[in-house]
Image: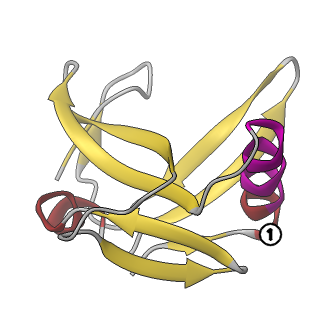
Amino acid sequence: MITVTEQAAKKIQQNLQRRGGGLGIRLGVKTTGCSGLAYVLEYVDMPTDEDMSFVSQNTHVFVDPKSLVYIDGTVVDYTRQGLNEGFEFTNPQVKDSCGCGESFRV
């Protein structure tokens, strides 16, 4: 299961409206960085047949089954710290992450 906070849901809905529509977001992982995996977030107009679908805060989150094993239980938040803002992922499966926070290991 993937959970979206209220702040993240608001930002996702704003971004979907700004881009002219969409069903929700796709959250996944790719192999990269110093620790091995990095999050990938993209907006979804049409889910694929293999996508798993979750609804949190009235926001649809699509995840491919291969990524779900690495991110199951993740909470997606949207935070602002000083001049920086962006999506933040709290994943209970993470065992280690790189110093810059761009990649992680499970």
Q: Is residue 36 visible?
A: no
Q: Which residue is mark 1?
A: 6
Front residue of 12/72: it is 12
Q: Colour mode?
A: secondary structure
41, above or below 71, in the image: above
Front residue of 3/64: it is 64
91, above or below 37, in the image: below
Q: Residue at x 47, y 41 (%)?
A: 42
Q: In x, y percent, where is residue 74?
A: 43, 66
Q: Main secondary structure of the magenta part?
A: helix
Q: SS for tag 1?
A: helix
Q: Residue at x 78, y 56 (%)?
A: 13
Residue 29 lies left or right of residue 10; in this view the side is left
Numbered range of the magenta stretch: 10-19
Q: In x, y percent, where is residue 7?
A: 81, 59
2, above or below 44, in the image: below
Location of the N terminus (image quadrant): bottom left
Residue 3 lies left or right of residue 17; in this view the side is left
Q: Is residue 12 magenta?
A: yes
Residue at the right extreme of this rendering: 82
Q: In x, y percent, where is residue 66?
A: 11, 60
Residue 81 lies left or right of residue 5; in this view the side is right
Q: Is residue 94 magenta?
A: no
Q: Give the residue type that dot 1 points to.
A: Glu
Q: In x, y percent, where is residue 47?
A: 37, 63
Q: Is residue 92 visible?
A: yes
20, above or below 59, in the image: above
Badge 1: how crowded within 10 Å, few (<14), some, or many (20+)? some
Quadrant of the rendered structure where residue 56 is?
bottom right
